[in-house]
Amino acid sequence: MEIDLKYSRRTYSYLALRKAIGWIGILLPFTLMLGTFLIFKEDIIQSSISHYYHTSMRDVFVGALCAIALFMFYYCGHDKWDNWAGHAAGFFAIGVALFPTTEFGPSDWIGKIHFACSALLFITLIIFSLFLFTKKDSNPTPQKLTRNKIYII
């Protein structure tokens, strides 16, 4: 009985962590923009989320990406493709965090690495949403069908 409780707590913690990472991803653009306005009194909206690296919100941007990367490295999916995509997303998130976008003018080599990592991160997240998260058994529940619609949107 005690073993079952231990595993159910771990499962609950893992699911809660997964939701928290999702919320970080959803709220990050708004947090960066509002933090720049409200805390640091800067009044320029950046042309991309990556340009917040060059504002006072840099630490929040890099920290959020590192948190997402750490979770993705330890993500356990249902099969090897889930695991591979998780590791790839973690690697690309670290690349986005550690290689900042070019602030002004044409991209230098660091900006090009940033662009490649961010594009590949988004492609990997799209693969998760459209193909991996939407896999279903032969008899999916109504909740699973609703979640699949949300993933596709």
Image (cartoon, rainbow, N blue to C red):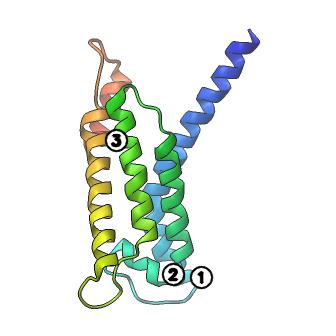
Mark seen at residue 85: 3
Residue in the image at 43% along x and 78% along y: 52
In this rendering, does residue 133 appear at all? no
Mark 2 vs mark 3: which is more N-terminal?
2
Amino acid found under the numbered disc labelled 1: Ile
Q: Please, what secondary structure does the residue beneath circle 3 have? A: helix
Q: Please, what secondary structure does the residue beneath circle 1 have? A: loop
Amino acid found under the numbered disc labelled 2: Thr
Mark seen at residue 36: 2
Q: What x and y, as percent, mark residue 17?
A: 57, 42
- From the viewer's perspective, is the residue at label 3 or at label 1 nearer? 3
Residue in the image at 51% along x and 83% along y: 37
Badge 3 local density, few (<14 within 10 Å), some, or many (20+)?
A: many
Q: Please, what secondary structure does the residue beneath circle 2 have? A: helix
Report the front residue among 88 and 6.
Answer: 88
- The answer to whether residue 83 is above or below residue 113 is above
Choose top left, top right, bottom left or bottom right for residue 50: bottom left
